Amino acid sequence: MAQKDNTLNVITHVLGLLTSWLGPLIVLLVTKDKTTKQHARKALNWQLSYMIYMIISFVLMFVLIGFLLIPIIAILDIVFCIMAAVKAGKNELWDYPLAIPFLK
């Protein structure tokens, strides 16, 4: 039994680290594979949520708590994207914690 190639699924989550929301969006629009589209939606939802969390943290810098939140959220982005890429490598679809479900 041949195993399905999941390289694009892994790359989709890694692109989130490198290109923010743009990489997963391009993968979502270009691919025809249902599984890859699901991975791209999950990655895109997280990247959009991450962007919102960073904007809120920037605003909260005026009351000093943002200085603490920005590095925490940046570390979460790295950890979540790596975890999602590893799961995608095992042909699993992983739900990002804290991701707002913009696309279903």
Image: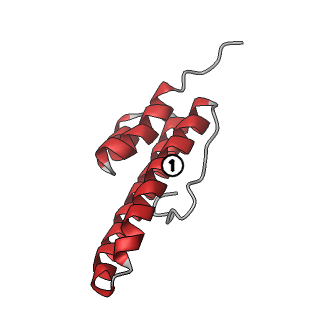
Residue 82 percent coordinates (x, y) = 50, 42
Answer above or below: position of 42 versus 1. below
Residue pictured at 45% horizontal, 55% vertical: 75
Residue 39 percent coordinates (x, y) = 51, 43
Answer above or below: position of 37 versus 64. above
Q: Quick one: which residue is furthest to the right in this view?
A: 1
Q: Quick one: which residue is furthest to the top in this view?
A: 1
Left/right of residue 75 with respect to residue 3 in the rendered view: left
Residue pictured at 40% horizontal, 72% vertical: 68
Answer above or below: position of 96 versus 72. above
Residue pictured at 35% horizontal, 76% vertical: 66
Along the viewing direction, whichever of 57 and 95 lies nearer the viewer: 57
- Tell me if mark 1 has few (under 14), some (14-19) or many (20+) residues whose alpha carbon lies within 10 angstroms of its own: few
Along the viewing direction, whichever of 82 and 88 lies nearer the viewer: 82
Residue 31 percent coordinates (x, y) = 41, 34
Left/right of residue 8 with respect to residue 29 in the rendered view: right
Residue 10 in view in this figure: yes
